[in-house]
Image (spheres, rainbow, N blue to C red):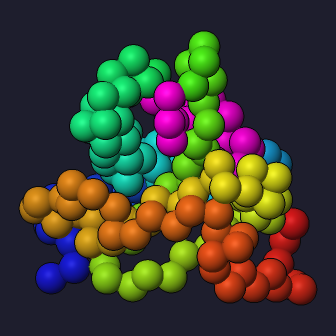
Amino acid sequence: KIIDKKTGVKIIYGLKKIREEIRKNKFNFNKKYEDIHLNIENRLFEIIGEKAEELTIKFEKNRLRKIKLNQESENVNQISQDFANKGYDIESFSKKTPSLVHNLFIEVKGRSGRDKSFFMSSNEIQTAKQKGEQYAIYFWSNLGRKKNPTEPTEIIPDPVTNLNIQECDNCLN
């Protein structure tokens, strides 16, 4: 069993709703999401919720509290709902900063199974290049089970340096 029945029902419901919206020409294709995949993914997240991002927010706040950065923990921001084209989902902190200026920018990736593969948009790759060591991917696997994980499966700092990112020639940019 990869996901629990309740989550599976939500995903199927969401995908059917998206299919209906597309068939009736009521699906809002938005250029800021770069391609059809990101448009559908964004709409599905709107419908069924953003579990990996929710878990990341909780994880980040707890991580910061453990290292006595209580003020920073209260200022972790999920920006993906308001700024989908920023190239990351969460603004956080890697250390204490003057005036609570964010210095950790997190792109969240999640999978329902154990597979560790994921896609990065060209915008995410460009943002990761610009942010360098201040950029990280928080990867969550096994989402949608009865008991969700409490910490990311893997945290990948500076993915441009630490991953073998392969850009494809025929992908939409």
Q: Is residue 80 visible?
A: no
Residue 53 against residue 72 in the figure, above or below: below
| Residue situated furthest top in the rendering | 99
- 85 relative to 156, above or below: above
- Is residue 83 on the magenta stretch? yes
Check residue 52 for magenta coloring: no
The structure residue drawn at horizontal position 21% and vertical position 60%, both measured from the top left corner, is 149
Q: Quadrant of the C terminus?
A: bottom right
Closest to the observer, 19 or 156: 156
**Where 40 falls versus 156 (above or below)?**
above
- For this rendering, which residue is in front, 29 or 139? 139
Q: Which quarter of the picture shows residue 63?
A: top left
Quadrant in which the N terminus appears: bottom left
Side of 31 relative to 85 (left or right): right
Residue at image position (21%, 72%) is 3
Main secondary structure along the magenta-highlighted residues: loop
Q: Position of residue 64 (x, y in %)?
A: 35, 35
Relative image position of residue 131 (x, y in whole percent): 75, 50
The residue lying at 67 percent from left, 34 percent from top is 83
Asked whether, in this view, residue 15 is left or right of residue 33, the answer is: left
Spot occupied by residue 143 in the image (x, y as percentages of width and height) = 28, 65
Q: Using residue 67 as the reference point, say whether residue 37 is left or right of it.
A: right
Please say if 131 is above or below 74: below
Q: Residue at x 30, y 28 (%)?
A: 68
Measured from the top left, where is residue 115 in percent x and y?
Answer: 39, 85
Any part of residue 101 in sight: yes
Question: What's the magenta region?
Answer: 76-96
Q: Quadrant of residue 136?
A: bottom right
